Image (cartoon, grey):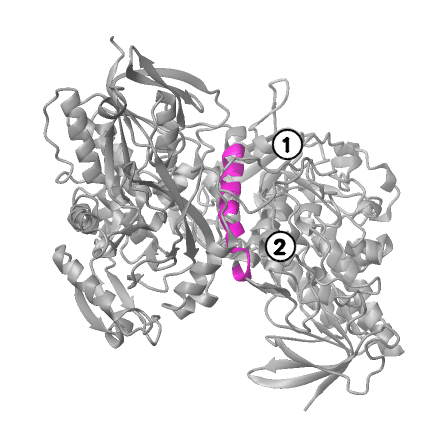
Amino acid sequence: MAIDSEVLVVGGGIAGITAAIAAAREGADTRLVSHKASTLRQASGLIDALGYLPATEPAKPLREGPPTAGRNLDPDEWPDPEGPLADPFEAIDRLPEDHPYRLVGADALREGLDLFDDLVGDAYLGGHTDRNALVPTFGGSVKPTARYPASAAAGIASDDRPALIVGFRSLTEYDARTFADRLAAAGVPFDVAGAEVEFAEAFRADAKITRLAKALDRDEPIDGTPAREALAKAVGPHLHDVVDGEGGVDRVERVGFPAFLGDDHPAEVRAELADRLGADVFEIPMGPPSLPGLRLEDLLYDALDDAGVRFETGTPAVGYEVDADGGGGSGGDGDGDRIDHLVMDRKGSEVPYGAEAVVLATGGLVGKGLDSDRDGVREPVLDLHVPQPADRYEWFVDDAFGEQPYARFGVRPDERLRPLDESGEVAYGNVRVAGAVVGGADVAREKSASGVSLATGLVAGREAAREVRQ
Amino acid sequence: MDDQVDVVVVGGGSTGCGVIRDLARRGLDAVLVEKGNLTHGTTGRMHGLLHSGGRYAVSDQKSARECIEENRVLRDIASHCVEETGGMFVKRPEDDEEYFQEKLEGCRACDIPAEVIDGEEARRREPYLARDVEKAIVVPDGAVDPFRLCVANAADAREHGARVETHAEVTDVLVEDGAVVGVEIEHDSGPGKRVHREPGTTEEIRARYVVNATGAWAGQLGEMAGVDVEVRPSKGVMTVMNTRQVDTVINRCRPKGDADIVVPHETACILGTTDEEVDDPEDYPEEEWEVDLMIETLSELVPALKDARTLRSFWGVRPLYEPPGTGTDDPTDITRDYFLLDHAERDDLPGMTSIVGGKLTTYRMMAESITDHVCEKLEYDADCDTADAPLPGSEDFSVLRDYMEEFGIRSPIGRRSAQRLGSRTDDVLSGTDPNPVVCECEGVTRAEVRDGIEQAGSDLNAVRLRTRASMGNCQGGFCTHRIASELAGEYPEPVAREAEDELYQERWKGQRHALWGRQLSQAMLNHLLHATTMNRDGDPATTDADVDFGAFDAGVEPGGGSAGDGSTSDDPAAGVAATDGGGHGDR
């Protein structure tokens, strides 16, 4: 028995959810299916739009031929990126021509961010301005981002109030003292100190971040003291650690913690800590498992419900069928074939999911929307064309942070986000692609991952709805 | 001269480390200089096979006998560096039966315990072996951790008064009145531990004797002394899998050929190898076909390798040598034997001997023979005890069992720490509290990382070699920054930063050769974590960017009002508290 909807979105990350909601808001009957949990748990929870224009050409020609054993022989040299960019919109025109932002335009990014603001309400800030914010990263730097969770707001780097960075002896992600020194090296306009404190060591040394978050949520006693009080007590002695330029001692006005201040009740945890410390409290976005990422996932799933999108997970796409009686046909009007339905694996049985329009938002190399072996990189659901050098030794450059061809791998669409085949023709007229499955961006160096997902998700969702109406 | 030492040993591979240990234990005043880390050259870039001798049992029985003899010695003196995996020579239908019999007879002739099992029994022991493997010869091959072995040798040498200088490249061999009298070295960051950002210094070390133990680099050192040493460096690839498809060393039973061995090593399997002569031991191509060949050919023995995840590949150069006039064309035919080249006899240049050829399994025996030679030259009389005295960490195997108990034999982390540290377990683990795991893939705790830092300074690649931190699935993606964080107590931020960058780039280099499938996904995840989440690539601290913080969003109330975000002063959202304290932030 076929399961039909007007718009079928495949993929449950930011791009898929945005596309589904955008399509639903256009009045389309929309269903979203995803294979696994999204990769949001691996994301910081910040919503980056565009923070840098990374160099795409090396400072000197790259060495020819295969890698050599000469370990420091003739290393790559890449110019510094342009940035951090205060304005993510004005720089879009200077991105490479086939960048997804160039295809959908700055307005799509703007509208994508507006939609995001609408979905998450006051859980996120940054929507009051077009400017990027500079937010501390757990690597001890600052990075430009367009939207940040309320929990990170007091950490903004353009705020001149003195800050304390707290680290935990039992946590290995960063050392707070080095962190503070790195922020100073990055030139932040505030005085900052770092302190490694003893907290929650009653838990075994490798307690998961989520375990600590729960303890703070529930205010569990730790050695007899409620967790929040215990944490404040551990930090208390360091509130005067900051020494200003003249050697004077300042009481800090804000305190940063690794992002585990509560899972279910983070605002309550922060409020109590702030009250006990007499200083604002902020979270520093961390790597996986990322609580801000997981909290965002919850928010977006709620929004999906509110928008009336039917949603199921654990359902991978395993095949597809092309519309037999055309509706275009390759070479005809240049609009390609049409997908009649996708075949989904539903608890072991193959079920056709019919739709008038399909949005593919299956992710990139991390989310498995792109697959690869020694012979090449593929888009596994519809076998869409993924441009790539034939030789896998041309997928990389020697500098880890250089212009890595693999980082831009993905399906190349037209400006309506219809996937293009090898000859540049539309492959399927009723398919749209969004998010990391779209190639052309190095979202990591650009700091553009969420923005690309929002902008392409929005356009793909609207386009899909338009497809239905036609 | 007062500051003259007895012996300078050049080269911190297995041979040099073995020699310095032997010299020191015999009471000579000796210095080891190595241009990189210990094992930087060939030793750190091998597959980790502890030979039973089986591989040479047909072609080179002298080497085969030496191997089995030293194999037994190392199990005894270096138990914490050796895993007694056992090995098999497996025969596929197309492999020559006659050769199989020759191999078996050869093993027996060389006193290598060898037992024939049928294919079914072979698959019972190693279930991933191919269905059509017909039979196998079981031999006592093993796996050896070359890093741990060299570090233990160097540590023992130090305990016996030797000086060990890494990151100290020889820039000249001092020749006076027709004799070698020492070396000039350049310390990368001053003598002692390597610390980033410390200025380099040069030093002259005068010595009564110089040992050239630079392996594939022996020709380059010889040149500085004005003598020819005709090593024929030959490269070979090693491909690292992410898991142990086999727990036994699997050799292909055929005369010779590329891609004929799988060595289980710690959490991984290492596939080897190729054999191609190169001109320069530092600059040769690392080629795609070599990696492909490993996977294609060895999956004939272990089919699961075909689709398995590869973490990285690395190459090493063998320091092959053959006496002048032998004229072997194919490097695979060059003997694996070692040679002492006394430059007094050979080139009329007294004061220096080069040692070339050989293999890791027989490093101790080579060290003994060159130390004997040096003692003779110096007219010094002392006995060698390196075959009997256990290395630091391997003093008492029963102690190791106790530690494994004490530090939680039930905890895989504790067990692995104890396996790596051997009898040093107590010293290292008991001083650090709390002791969280820093490298999750390899189960390396803070205590071990800090112990590595204490030994190696801010050189995190040296810490990696000592601990295995960053050598697992994520190839440093999740732990490079954590390892670097452990430098914080001792070193300033810029040192930690450089050390971190260096380790991250080093880990990237090997992954380039494994960039497909799941490792490509991992590489992208690492890229996202380090560039997106941490912004290590665009950090204003390391770029020339002059950041105008006032041009960015300064937040909205309270406190931050001074920073200039003029465009939004009348924005309705400006009243929203930038801190929390209620509202709907609690989601």
Q: Distance between the residues labelled 1 and 2?
A: 23 Å
Where on the picture, by quarter, is residue B205?
top left
**Residue B208, image x, y percentages:** 23, 17
Q: Main secondary structure of the magenta part?
A: helix
Q: For numbered disc 2, what is the local secondary structure?
A: loop
Which portion, as a residue range, is magenta?
B497-518
**Residue A383, image x, y percentages:** 67, 72
Res B433 visible = no
Which residue is farthest bottom?
A: A1
Q: Residue at x 81, y 33 (%)?
A: B564
Q: Residue A449 carries which label?
A: none
Q: Is residue B33 above or below residue B530?
A: above
Q: Which residue is drawn at 72% across and 63% down?
A: A411
Determine which residue is flagged by label 2. A43
Q: Nearer the viewer, residue B367 or B30?
A: B367
* Three-letter code, disc 1: Ala
Closer to viewer: mark 1 or mark 2: 1
Q: Is residue B243 above or below residue B579?
A: below
* Three-letter code, disc 2: Ala
Q: Which mark is residue B541?
A: 1
Chain bearing tag 2 is A
Q: In this view, does B506 lie above or below A451?
A: above
Q: Which quarter shows the N terminus of chain A? A: bottom right
Q: Which residue is drawn at 71% across and 41% down?
A: A57
